Image (cartoon, rainbow, N blue to C red):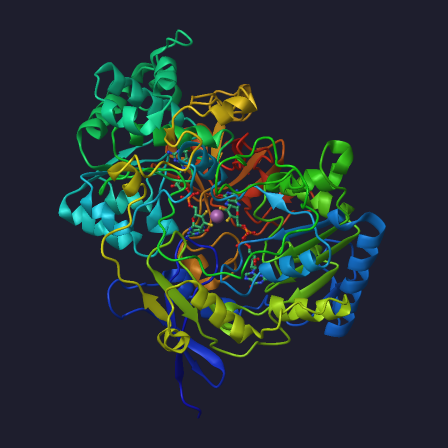
Amino acid sequence: MSQTKTIITACSHDCGGRCVLKVHVANGKILRIETDDGNAPQLRACLRGRAYRQRVYSADRLQYPMKRTGERGEGKFERTSWDEAQDTIAKELVRIRDTYGNASIMYIPGAGSQAALHGAQAVERLLAKFGGYTRFWGVPSFEGALFASMASYGTMMTGNDREDLLNSKLIIMWGWNPAVTIWDTGTIPTLIKAKEKGVRIVCIDPRLTESVAVLGNEWIPIRPSTDAAMLIAMAYVMIERKLQDQKFLDTYTVGFDRFRDYVMGTEDNISKTPAWAEAITGVPQATIERLALEYATTKPAALIPGWGPARMSLGEQFSRAAIVLACMTGNVGIEGGYAGGFMRAFHSREMGMPRGIRNPVEVGSSYRPNSLYKLRGAGHPTAARVHAVKIHDAILQGKAGGYPCDPKMAYIVASSYPNSYPNINKAIAALKSLEFVVVHEQRMTPGAKFADVLLPVNTFMEREDVISPWLGSPYLLHMDKAIDSIYECKTDRDICDELATRLGITDYREGHIDEEWLKLIAEASGDVQDYDEFKKKGVLKLKKERPFVAFREQIDDPNNNPFPTFSGKAEIYSEHIAEMNNPMLPPAPKYIPAPEGYGDPLSQKYPLQLMSTHHKPATHSSLEKVPWLEEVEPRRLWVNAVDAKARGISDGDEVLVFNDRGKILMKTKVTERIMPGVVNLCQGGWFDISEDGIDLGACANTLVTDEHSPGGAWSTNTVLVEVKKA
Ligand SMILES: Nc1nc2c(c(=O)[nH]1)N[C@H]1C(S)=C(S)[C@@H](COP(=O)(O)OP(=O)(O)OC[C@H]3O[C@@H](n4cnc5c(=O)[nH]c(N)nc54)[C@H](O)[C@@H]3O)O[C@H]1N2
Ligand SMILES: Nc1nc2c(c(=O)[nH]1)N[C@H]1C(S)=C(S)[C@@H](COP(=O)(O)OP(=O)(O)OC[C@H]3O[C@@H](n4cnc5c(=O)[nH]c(N)nc54)[C@H](O)[C@@H]3O)O[C@H]1N2
Ligand SMILES: [Mo]
């Protein structure tokens, strides 16, 4: 019997947490997994990290390289050698580049690994050195919130330290469910402390979420994609009663007058009263008025606008309106307040491979007209990129459809493409039309089935890495290797290094072996002084003098600290957006009825609003088919009892959920925890389209629209469907 050893690593899938995993290993196998029991703040893993053993050893782990034998997507493969697989990829890369140019190589990276060294970035590096590729813009998580953050504040660093919530007197969780989505590992423990301290917590969400259940003093259900109307009516109440912090607005913001003209109806003869908003949102006017008064008169207060309500067809309006309320109440830059926006709270530099290798395909390409390129620090999607939800359309239509390229091959890595992307049926047609598809995966996912060459990649348990927290909480994690790579799996980096050699690229590793890179990356954070010590302990908890509060300096000393916007102030009205001249993207936030949202004529045919939120026992599609996790909470369509009754549906019944894009056959959960008129199906289910075109795998994206907002938000929560008993 060999001895049991314990190593410390961290989960690197893209969930909102970064938690410590203590992995007990014997004879080269993982026996069990525990978590942080060290000094506070403890970085305790959730059910997903602790169940990870079943994922590492799951039956659908890829074991060796494979090549397609059947039709593309059929899932028929035969085993091949690493040499043959890589020779084929190298040959196809060269053929496609030489025939069609680098822009025809569609690089599709995903969120599978968020660690610094391993994951999709390995392929990005290879393809950049190979002459370039086409990539996408429009991050599914936050593009609406990011646009709002850049437009209003000129930065994404708009969050406060979690522990600062203990300084708030009122916390408004607006479409934010960290009891499930974590949003930095310390968030829920801090919110529980705030509740115990007596801080009032109000949750605005179409669902009575786990966060409402654990924390909420009040739950306000609201129709999806209508939140901007409620926020604007709250502004109306404040303005009518002269409760806005006018001194704050005058000192730190521009454009409030323009917004006020819209709110009060000077601009369009419609006063945006609570009664006006009730008809849109379904929230009683008295509730809107009461919350507006409470937020305006309780200071400091934190209104936290989640990314979920912004993942809609006009998502940036919600995020921008929430920012205006934070300014109107003077809650920006003060302890216990909250600015909204993107909400990163920064301590150390994020740990990652050094940037600097530009994609040659994008060099010289102009910026997209709807990007905020002039704003300092903005992500700057160029005109050479395709929006993420338009990848399938770009493949199918190419330059003839107005896209910047004619894609001929897809290089998919650490991504579930197409599973996590909207409009699965269109994506399938697109993938089938390509000349060549490579996938680097860990398991036989629905996307992996579309590969011509499928390469097996190891998991974070089988390699060493470092990782920083999601939103910048003050700690860093080292990820030790628990076990050797199982089967014939390799890291994405080793695969790319071997491909590089075949492609005549000699400097892929740039003179450093992986271990040296890890040391360089960790030390570049500025916080890791002694790498060996960091590696031994596995976690570095950073000490700070006082909590990070975004815009503290701007508020304390405005003359010396302008906001990083054009005007130097927080922009309620943005001249730059005005220049874009798009009626669906107004320069000051407005409520505009959302395409495919509440009240859209399409609701005559498809009367239910579908949301696809993030699932407790899943990280997108990355933790499917893990029995322990499926046991905790199987994926069900949440339907309100009123809607169920009207359709003769009982709890647990099989139903067909459908719209013009597709059909899903699945079980229901009939519950009062979702408001009438709204259904929810958590994202991430592995699609499994039957011969008669029905998805048996409950993948929400079978139904989700592949349109995006003008600012770039995905529209996953603005979807209309109908449900009937199967
Ligand atoms: N367990 C788990 N945690 C995760 C992930 C995961 O897959 N699983 N994914 C991680 C990633 S990458 C991300 S980006 C984040 C996502 O984090 P979020 O975007 O915050 O998560 P969601 O569950 O999509 O949405 C949050 C809440 O918004 C509500 N909501 C949806 N639409 C509306 C609306 O129109 N109005 C209002 N008021 N509320 C609405 C939903 O009911 C939900 O409770 O989560 C991270 N954490
Ligand atoms: N309908 C709907 N769709 C959504 C969302 C929604 O709210 N609703 N949310 C969106 C959001 S916020 C996000 S972030 C995306 C996430 O979408 P994706 O980025 O596609 O993330 P996952 O679905 O987790 O798929 C990641 C894949 O990477 C693989 N993987 C993990 N680690 C590695 C590795 O080291 N190397 C390689 N080669 N592969 C690896 C996993 O096995 C998994 O199949 O989904 C989006 N899709
Ligand atoms: Mo995300």
Is 517 rendered above or below residue 368? Answer: below
Q: Is residue 81 visible?
A: no
**Residue at point 46% right, 31% down?**
316
**Residue at point 54% right, 31% down?**
709
Where is residue 690? Give x, y as percent: 66, 47
Outermost residue on the front side: it is 560
Where is residue 108? Give x, y as percent: 64, 51
**Residue at point 37% right, 17% down?**
279
Q: Quadrant of the N terminus?
A: bottom left
Depth order, front residue of 7/66: 7
Q: Quadrant of residue 221?
A: top left
Outermost residue on the bottom side: it is 1
Q: Quadrant of the C terminus?
A: top right
Q: Is residue 336 visible?
A: yes
**Residue at point 53% right, 37% down?**
714
Q: Is residue 570 left or right of residue 150?
A: left
Where is residue 481? Give x, y as percent: 48, 76
Q: Is residue 258 left or right of residue 418?
A: left
Outermost residue on the top side: it is 269
Is 404 rendered above or below residue 486? Answer: above
Depth order, front residue of 262/572: 572
Q: Is residue 425 left or right of residue 512?
A: right
Ligand 1 location (quadrant): top left
Where is residue 161? Give x, y as percent: 29, 50
Depth order, front residue of 574/416: 574
